[in-house]
Structure formats: structure tokens, C-alpha cells
Amino acid sequence: MRCVSCKKMVPSASTRCPYCGGEVTDKNDIEETPITSTESVQQSTSSSSNKIDFVELLTDPDKKKLVLIGGGILVFFIFMIIIVASLSGSKPKMVTNYKAYSKLFDKVEDFLSESFFDNSYVGSGTYDFYIKYNKDINEFSGKYNYDLKNKIINITASAKNPDENKGVIIVDFKKFDSELNFNKGELYYSSEQITDKPILFKFDDKDGYLSNTRYDMNDLVVSFFDSLEEALKKMNYGTTTETVQFLGESAKFDKLYFKLNNEGRKTFYTTFYNSLADDSSFTSEMGKIQGKKSSEIEEIYRNYATSAEYAYSGSGDANTVVSLYTKNNQFKRFEINNQDDSNLKKIYRIDVDDSRYHFYYMENGKTIYEGSLLILTNEINGVVNRKYEITLDSSKFNIDINLNVKLDSKPKVELKDNLEGTKFIDLTDEEKGEIKTKLGEFIKNTKFFDKLDDIFIDKCSLASDCKCNDKEPTCSCLYNKEVIQCPNPDLNKPKEDTVDENEINKTTTTTTTTESTTTSTVTTTTTATN
């Protein structure tokens, strides 16, 4: 459950928050119940087994592999699956206004907080990973551990012969071991069979999310969903009954939807950004990330709201419809139907049956990507085991993934100090060619390696003709005939000693209200904060 005052997660049996003393409210106990959901599809003897931990699903921080399988489309569907998965296990009634959506996202907020932040941000365990890309099969096993607070992820991987569990005599199989170490925005890849020294992949981290450890991600998550709820309140909702094709059959559903035309988008985005600007917790945490004062973060998001108001004030044909479908008080479909000014119609959809989540991406009625997800969880002798089965298909590829994860009951995180390596962007074409050749001895499909230049190249260092505004955090620069956004060098200098004005106010208030505080102490405190 979550404290309604300080927003921290508290034990389910609590009536008072142990952090602030405020009353505790379980969102599921609110009289107006949220949108319907599917039954739990997981097999478990654990009371919390219907909580899916996507850290294990995404244990490989090497996001380059997403280029192979649809990039942003996959990331988008993962977020949509989190929405659906977080609703499993209940049968609430349908409501016909924003509360259906806000309560849905309340579930997502709680799911993220409980999965990633409640256990001190840490986790560890072992895994077995199987991937079939078209006809090529690769299998790995290894260990993982992570500390999200301190931005640390460590993964070991050893190649497995696909035939070793089939009783086949293994004649020619080469050993292949590798290790990934992610530390504050830097990814080190090492393998004795591939390279003499680790290769450093440096992520583009303009805003500091990956490298800064001073902020509380949970506070940002809470602020994001609170602001999302404020924006949802401003939308106009409709209900209807609709017969659609559902998993190959005709089915009749109840449908709740809202539209985002230009006027709707203007209202949504201006409300969302202004709500974030009004949230002192959000501006404080973002200030820690970017090394700015809360007032500077507030101004940035006010500007975002003004820009959105200007961008959507004109006429246009763009329109987005967000819909929830239910049948017999069961959640069955979540869909985003988008048509832009070029009349390109895009549909992002998740269908839910008794055992799997099915997701689709379509353009002008043609299916571009489709896939499915099955999640099974069980607990044996105190050890939690999770199994993920994922498929993703298109006209160009077919991917099957099986991921089996064992979670340590007492997570142990390994701190890798003094990591050193050769920057990938500093490698010569000849060196990259040698690495790719060696990699090809162990992995049949190495096409992803050719995409790494586009992912990890420092575009801003090569950009030219930058146009900057004194008050804007980014500059518009030209790279390869494309306008990109780069950090404003005058506004993005590190400010490690920056003191947030909210903290100053807290200090001043505490000082002036303490009876035993002397005049000299007040003077000292004021001087220090200035």
C-alpha cells in the first residue's frame, strides 16, 4: 500500500505510515473501482507471484539488440504489457470517466514501485536465455545482479550448445564467455575470445538519468503518474459497444475511449507539464539530476507547456483515440489508434486471452509487428523461478525468446571499481572488423554489430552550426543534414554544490522554530545557505 501523504510504500497491514505518521489508504479499497482486468496467468504458490519483474526480462542493458527487433516499437509494447500485467488478479467494475484510466495507471505506478524500488533497488540471481532469430539459435546462461539506485548492473554469460541437453555427442563447440558491467552510464563489455581488453560503450546521457545517483527515481515515478492523472481529468470520455476481430474470432466488447485531436492534445500536454512544474518533489529531484535549482526546472516545464499550447493551437487532421475494451467485467484489449497529418494510421494494440498477452503494431491496416508474451512464476523451497516466453514476428524476421530466471532471496550486488576499457567510438574500422569476425565464430547473426556506430556515436561532438538560447537547456545543432538537440554548454555545467531552495526553506524554518536556537546559529545557517 502507499501512504497518501508522503507517497512511500508501506506494509499492507499498516494503518499509519511509519515514515510520516499519516493515514494509509489502499487504492484498491476506494469505492469507485478501476477498469476491469484479466485473471492472473501465472502459476505460483506465492501470494505476490502475480507481480512481474521486468528487470529480469531486460537484464541485458545492451539496448543495441532492440535495433534488431523493432527498436522503439518493442519498448512501447513492453510498457503496454506492464500496464496489462499490473492489472492481473482482480475483477473491478467498469467506470465511465477518467477514473478508469487513472486507476489503471495507479496500478502501474504501484507495480513499478513494488517491483523496482521497495527492495532497496537491488536484485540478483541466475538465468538461462534462449533466442531463435529466423533459423539461427543461440543459448546463454549466467548470473546477474543490479543496484538501480547506484546505476550498477553486472551480467555474466556463457554460451551453451543447443544440442547439449538432447543427448547429442558434441564434436565441435567453442567456449564463449563474456561479461557486461554497467556503471553510471558506461557499459563495459569483455570476452577473452573476442577482445584483449574491455570495450567501453558510453551512453548518451545528456540529462544525467544514468549517471547521477543523488535522485530518487520513485519520487519521479509518483510525480509522473500524479501529473498524468491531472491531465486525464481534463479529457472528454465516451462509451459504446463494438464488435471487433479478437484473436481470430468476432467478439462484442464494451468500449471506453477518449480522443486526442489538436485541442485535446493541447489540453493534455499543457496540464501535464504545468502539473509537473507545480510539483515541488519533481522539480527537486530533477534539479538533482541536472544540477539545477528547482526554480530552473519549473521554468523549463512551464516552457514545455507553452510550447505545447503553441504547437497544437492551429488546425490539423491529427487525431489519437485511446480505448479500453472489456467483456463480462474482464479486461480484454488496450488500444491506441493514431492518425497523423499525413493520414498515416497507426494502431498499437494488446489483446489478453486466458494465458498470453498478444501485441500488434499496424500501419494503414497492415500488421507490421506482432508478438506474444507468456509469464509463469513458481516458488520452490523459497526460491522464486520466473519463465518468460516471447515471440515477435514481421515480414523480415521471426524471433522466439525463452528466459528462465531464478531470484536470490537475499540479493548480492557486486561493485566493480576502476573499470577501464577502450572506447568503442575510438576503435578503428580494422579493429571493429576483427571483433566482428571473432564474434561471428560464436554468433551466426552479427548484423546488430553494424548498428552500433549509429547508437553510440557522440553526435553532439561532431555537430556544427549550433543555435543556443541563454535560457534553454539544449541547443539546435546540425549533424549529417539533421537537426539534433545538444546540451547547452553554458547551462549544463556540473553544479555539485548547488543547494535546492526547497532545502533552504526547510533549513530556515527548522532553525527559526527551534526554541533553543541562538541568534548566532541563525546567522551561521543563513550565511551557509546563501
Image (cartoon, rainbow, N blue to C red):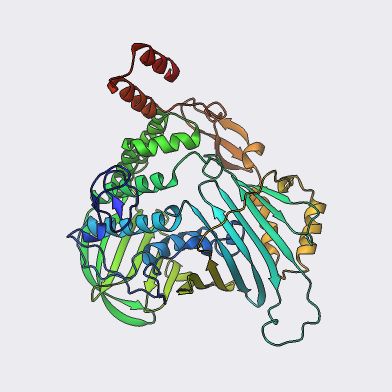
Q: Which residue corresponds to the image point at 78% horizontal and 59% vertical from the top-left? A: 192
Q: Quadrant of residue 81?
A: bottom left
The residue at the far front in this view is: 516
Residue 237's place in the image compared with 225, above or below, is below
Q: Quadrant of residue 161?
A: bottom right
Q: Which residue corresponds to the image point at 81% horizontal and 54% vertical from the top-left? A: 196
Q: Which residue corresponds to the image point at 38% horizontal and 15% vertical from the top-left? A: 521
The residue at the far left in this view is: 31
Q: Is residue 414 left or right of residue 491?
A: right
Residue 44 seen in this snapshot = yes
Q: Nearer the viewer, residue 175 or 393?
A: 175
Residue 304 seen in this snapshot = no
Q: Nearer the viewer, residue 308 or 3?
A: 3
**Residue 494: % across, % down:** 55, 30
Residue 205's place in the image compared with 513, above or below, is below
Disc count in the image? 0
Quarter in which the C terminus is drawn: top left
**Residue 293: % across, % down:** 43, 28
Q: Is residue 29 left or right of residue 62?
A: left
Residue 391's place in the image compared with 505, above or below, is below
Q: Is residue 380 left or right of residue 175?
A: left
Q: Nearer the viewer, residue 114 or 335?
A: 114
Q: Is residue 50 left or right of residue 479?
A: left
**Residue 21: % across, % down:** 26, 43
Q: Quadrant of residue 467?
A: top right
**Residue 218: % across, % down:** 41, 48
Quarter in which the N terminus is drawn: bottom left
Residue 376's place in the image compared with 196, above or below, is below
